[in-house]
Image (cartoon, rainbow, N blue to C red):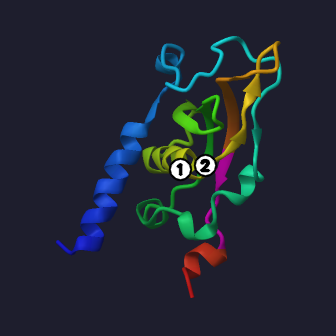
Amino acid sequence: MQSGAMMRIILFTLALAAASPVAAQDRIWPRDAGSGQPAVVQPVPRQPMTELITPDDYPAAALRANEEGEVSIRLLVSAKGRASDCAIRQSSGSRTLDAWTCWILKRRAGFTPALDAAGKPTHAVFDHVVTWKITEEIRRGPR
């Protein structure tokens, strides 16, 4: 097996592990939870979430299987503004697309942290929906 193919298998396996159920997330909070108090100001993405996933990110396996769909996710955002965990709230119907969504957003999403009532950074959740649609640009692939 070529090293590129092996790397894709490893990354996909890691992505599947990252996509854990929402119920489990209620018990998991980031190490850097800040004040630990409830957020009164929610986290704000540092860049538009729609810019974080590009056509080049479409998983090859999902493309070959003609898989499309919407995946609703919940990111756990630390008091430092990092996406520390990801959970699938509503599946796209494709394990590949679900896992890849969490894998990408955990690595690329950055936030202005949530604030508690005293104005101190704290942990919070951020919900988002990603739509995976196979377009002609995606079918053609990178140039």
Q: Secondary structure at mark 2?
A: strand
Q: Which quarter of the picture shows residue 50? A: bottom right
Residue under label 1: 107
Is residue 41 left or right of 125 when viewed as pictured?
A: right
- Name the mark nearer the viewer: 1 or 2: 1
Please tell me which residue lies in front, 79 or 5. 79
Q: Looking at the picture, which amino acid does disc 2 mark?
A: Gly
Task: In the rendered view, tell whether residue 46 sits above or below residue 26.
Answer: below
Q: Looking at the picture, which amino acid does disc 1 mark?
A: Arg
Please tell me which residue lies in front, 121 or 42. 121
- Residue furthest to the left in view is 1
Residue under label 2: 69
Which residue occupies 71% across, 41% down? 111
Q: Which residues are magenta?
A: 130-135
Cα distance in 3D space between marks 1 and 2: 21 Å
Q: Secondary structure at mark 1?
A: helix
Please tell me which residue lies in front, 88 or 69. 88
Residue 124 part of the magenta-drawn span: no
